[in-house]
Image (tube, helix red, strand yellow):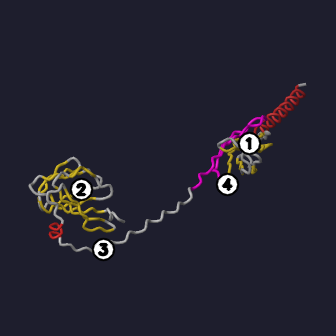
């Protein structure tokens, strides 16, 4: 009777070991699912995108292409998958998804279109070059004597000009009102007389031999103060001839 009991015990032990081994083996086997991914691809406005190459890497690898923005990947083993979405004209999109259970898993992606380069603009044709001015040699004292202002309020006479600048003789007995030159720097040389120049809110005394620079767009005026007229030579760099 004892021998029979021992034999039975041995049989039960072997059977138990086989069952335990089977359970452990079953635990080591991967769960195959099945897992289904329901993929939906749109643009940033929500319109479906067809022709998107979908690459899936994980427990298994799959490659597929969307039709009307959708595709279903079925019978996938449980696990974590890396999705890559590619289509010409769009930035590549990527997404990690965990696949688990039998219920279809939604994988939704909105792809952003690539920024199209701005077409090159044709450079503007340069304006035709102004013809150069004619050379001028002038006896300035004789010119002043011939065109002397006398007791008149003032006289402004052009002397010479070219594509890049002009020169003027200025004679004034009365103040010359404040003004500006938008596109020209003015270089002033006092030939005779006395007075005051006001440039950008600052006063500068003027006497024969004084040189003055007036930057473009700077408001300026001239006021004579001597007994005779204030006579100045004005050179405006950047101001072409008025008749061009």
Which sits earlier in the primary sequence, circle 3 or circle 2? 3
Which sits earlier in the primary sequence, circle 4 or circle 3? 4
Residue tagged by mark 3?
Answer: 134
Residue tagged by mark 1?
Answer: 39
Question: Closer to the camera, 76 or 236?
Answer: 236
Which sits earlier in the primary sequence, circle 4 or circle 2? 4
Q: Is residue 106 magenta?
A: yes
Q: Is residue 92 magenta?
A: yes
Instruction: Give the distance between the C-alpha atoms of the residues marked 3 and 2, in whole angstroms.
Output: 26 Å
Instruction: Point out which mark residue 230 bears.
Output: none
Quadrant in the picture for the N terminus: top right
Residue tagged by mark 4?
Answer: 88
Residue tagged by mark 2?
Answer: 214
Tag 1 and tag 3, C-beta contact below 8 Å: no
Q: Secondary structure at mark 3?
A: loop
Which quarter of the figure has residue 102?
A: top right
Question: Closer to the camera, 26 or 9?
Answer: 26
């Amino acid at each position: 009777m004892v021998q029979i009991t021992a034999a039975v015990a041995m049989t039960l032990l072997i059977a138990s070991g086989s069952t335990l081994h089977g359970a452990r083996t079953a635990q080591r086997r991967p769960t195959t699912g099945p897992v289904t991914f329901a993929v939906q691809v749109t643009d940033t406005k929500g319109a479906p995108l067809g022709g998107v190459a979908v690459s899936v890497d994980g427990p298994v690898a799959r490659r597929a292409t969307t039709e009307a923005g959708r595709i279903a990947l079925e019978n996938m083993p449980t696990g974590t998958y890396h999705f890559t979405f590619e289509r010409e004209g769009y930035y590549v999109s990527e997404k990690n998804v965990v696949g688990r259970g039998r219920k279809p898993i939604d994988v939704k992606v909105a792809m952003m279109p690539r920024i199209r380069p701005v077409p090159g603009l044709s450079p503007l044709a340069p304006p035709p070059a102004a013809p150069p001015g004619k050379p001028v040699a002038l006896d300035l004292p004789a010119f002043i004597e011939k065109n002397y202002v006398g007791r008149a309020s003032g006289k402004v006479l052009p002397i010479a000009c070219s594509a890049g600048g002009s020169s003027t003789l200025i004679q004034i007995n009365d103040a010359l009102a404040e003004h500006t030159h938008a596109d020209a720097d003015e270089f002033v040389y006092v030939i005779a007389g006395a007075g005051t120049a006001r440039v950008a809110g600052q006063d500068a005394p003027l006497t024969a031999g004084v040189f003055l620079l007036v930057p473009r767009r700077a408001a300026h005026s001239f006021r004579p103060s001597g007994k005779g007229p204030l006579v100045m030579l004005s050179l405006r760099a950047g101001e072409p001839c008025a008749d061009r």
